[in-house]
Image (cartoon, rainbow, N blue to C red):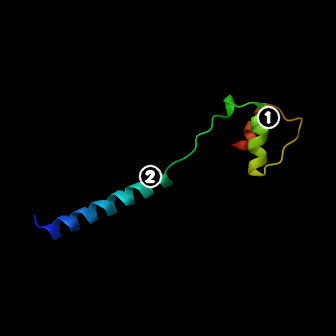
Amino acid sequence: MGLSAFNRYRREQETKLKAVATVSEKEIVEVVDYEEMTRAELKEMLDKKGIEYSDRDNRATLIELLR
């Protein structure tokens, strides 16, 4: 294999790696276990998402709102 062929092969491999890295970054999904969170943490999540709730809502209700 000549130098120019080697360089072409290397560029192709780098392009493939970049494509795989891009796909991998897009597939990252945050998994949150609401059952393990406190009521205060659930309220904070609802606030961040802009979802309205009542201060009287229990944990189960807050979890349903998040789903």
The percent position of residue 62, horizontal first and vertical second, equals 78, 38
Q: Eyeballing the image, is 31 above or below 2?
A: above
- Quarter of the image for the C terminus: give it: top right
User: Are there few (<14), some (14-19), or many (20+) residues within 10 Å of tag 2?
Assistant: few
Vertical comparison of 57 with 51: above or below: above
Which x, y percent locates residue 15? 33, 63
* Residue for point 41% across, 55% down: 21
- SS at badge 2: helix
Q: Residue at x 21, y 66 (%)?
A: 7
In the picture, measured across the screen, residue 66 lies left or right of residue 33, that is right
Q: Residue furthest bottom?
A: 4
For the image, the number of numbered tags is 2
Q: Position of residue 37 (x, y in %)?
A: 70, 31
Observer-nearest residue: 33 or 18?
18
The dot on residue 5 is none
Q: Nearer the viewer, residue 11 or 44?
A: 11
Name which residue lies at 38% across and 56% down: 20
Q: Quadrant of the N terminus?
A: bottom left
Q: Identify residue for label 1.
A: 40
Which amino acid type is shown beneath numbered disc 1? Answer: Ala
Question: Which is nearer the eye, 25 or 9?
Answer: 9
Q: Does residue 43 appear to the left or right of 9 in the view shown?
A: right
Secondary structure under the numbered disc 1 in the rendered image: helix
The percent position of residue 43, horizontal first and vertical second, equals 79, 39
Locate residue 40 relative to residue 29 in the image: left or right.
right
Residue at which label 2 appears: 24
Front residue (pair 61, 42): 42
Residue type at mark 2? Ser
Q: Earlier in the sequence, mark 1 or mark 2?
A: 2
Q: Residues within 10 Å of mark 1 (few under 14, many from 20)?
A: few
Which residue is located at x 34 percent, y 57 percent? 17
Q: Is residue 67 above or below residue 17?
A: above
